[in-house]
Structure formats: C-alpha cells, structure tokens
Image: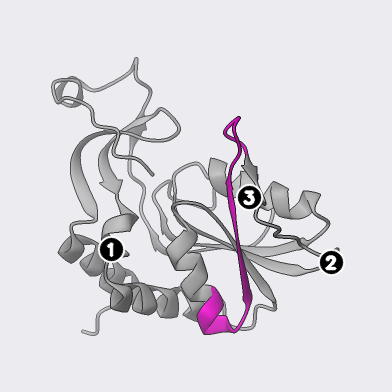
Amino acid sequence: MAETAEDEALRMFRESGALLEGHFILRSGLHSRQFFQCARVCEDLGRVERLAELLRERLVGLDYSTVVAPAMGGLVLGQEVARQSAARFLFAEKDAGGSLVLRRGFRLAAGERVLVVEDVVTRGGRARETIALVEAAGALPVALAVLVNRGGGDLGFAIPFEALVTLEIPTYAPTDLPGDLAAIPAVKPGS
C-alpha cells in the first residue's frame, strides 16, 4: 500500500528527530508527552521542500497572492510555500510585549488575499493572532495551512483550515498531570 501524505510527513519528523517523546511544556503552558520540534525537520531543506509540496496539495484551487507566517515556527515553511506558489512572503514577529506585529517595513494592502502558514497548532493561539493581524491590516485571510494539528479536529477557526498531519495528542494543565508524567522532569524546548 502506498504511503499517505500524512504518513510520509510523520516519517520525516521521526527520521529527523523532530517528534520528541517525554514531558514537555508547550507555549500555552499546557503539558504534553509529545512535542514537534519543527526546527529539526527544517534543518534539511529537501524535507522542507517536500513538506511544502505535500501541504500545497491540500490547497489546490485556493486563491492567494501573499503568505504570512508567524516567526519563528512558521518562518521556514511559510517561505517555502510562498516560493512554490510564486507568492509574496511576509512574517510576523513578537514586539517587546510579546504580541505579533509586522515589522521591517512589511505592509498588507486592503483586500490582499493571504494564506497564513504555521508549523504546529495545539489550540491555535499564535495562528489566531496572525489571522487577526492580517485582518487588522485590511487584508483577507483566505485559509490557514499547518504541518501538524496536534489538537485534533477543526479547532474552530473562522477561515478554512488545512493540516498535513492531524493528531489528537492529550495535553494537561500543570495542576492536573497524570502521575507517570509528573514523575518525569518537564522540558520547555521552545517553539
């Protein structure tokens, strides 16, 4: 049987050491047994190219002229999706207060059709912030495309949402950890 796009992506994550097992603290503050360190899979630009191809296969027929990605996670993937799409690429980055902003002279035009690209979402906080940033600029976010949806399901985005890999990986509040997970030292690997 042929390897599915999802299986191929998961294989690349495992081979590159980007899918980690242990006790992790996510950006949201939740805890998890698994962590996708996309920076590891993005070390190999051939893998980045292939992951972008696989993700773009899910976007056939989507009309956009610009790709916007939040730094750092979506930066490399977003740029490659833009390159393959012959689209303009911008990235949002944190300001001194930790909010995402467009800097470096980046501007979006009113009505500009934007694809938002992110590496991994659990609840989608950073993706939602990027979508809101695009809307605040008067541009039109037409879809959100991610490598991994580790929250399972659609996560309630108001725009079309495409994920190359969808998994339902349990997360836990710091005060509600299972005993076996609490016994492992927590690591915050960065996103």
The picture places residue 119, in percent across and down from the top left corner, at 43, 57
The one of 105 and 2 positioned closer to us in this rendering: 105
Specify few, some or many for label 1: CA neighbours under 10 Å numbering under 14, 14-19, or 20 or more: many
Residue matched to label 2: 111
Residue matched to label 1: 41
Q: Is residue 114 visible?
A: yes
Q: What residue type is labelled 2?
A: Gly
Q: How far apart are marks 3 and 1 (CA)?
A: 23 Å
Q: What residue type is labelled 3?
A: Thr
- Compared with residue 113, is residue 133 higher up or lower down, i.e. above or below? above
Asked which secondary structure carries label 3, the reply is: helix
Asked which secondary structure carries label 1, the reply is: helix
The residue at 55%/44% (across/down) is 126
| Farthest residue, direction front | 104
User: For residue 184, which quarter of the picture?
Assistant: top left
The picture places residue 10, in percent across and down from the top left corner, at 26, 64
What is the total number of numbered labels drawn onto the structure image? 3
The picture places residue 6, in percent across and down from the top left corner, at 33, 69
The residue at 37%/35% (across/down) is 26
Instruction: Tell me the quarter of the image containing the C terminus.
Output: top left
User: For residue 186, which quarter of the picture?
Assistant: top left
Magenta residues (range): 82-99
Nearer-N-terminus badge (1/2): 1
Q: What residue type is labelled 1?
A: Val
Answer whether residue 43 is magenta in the image. Answer: no
The one of 57 and 92 positioned closer to us in this rendering: 92
Nearer-N-terminus badge (2/3): 2
Q: Distance between the residues labelled 1 and 2?
A: 34 Å
- Compared with residue 133, is residue 11 higher up or lower down, i.e. above or below? below
Residue matched to label 3: 130
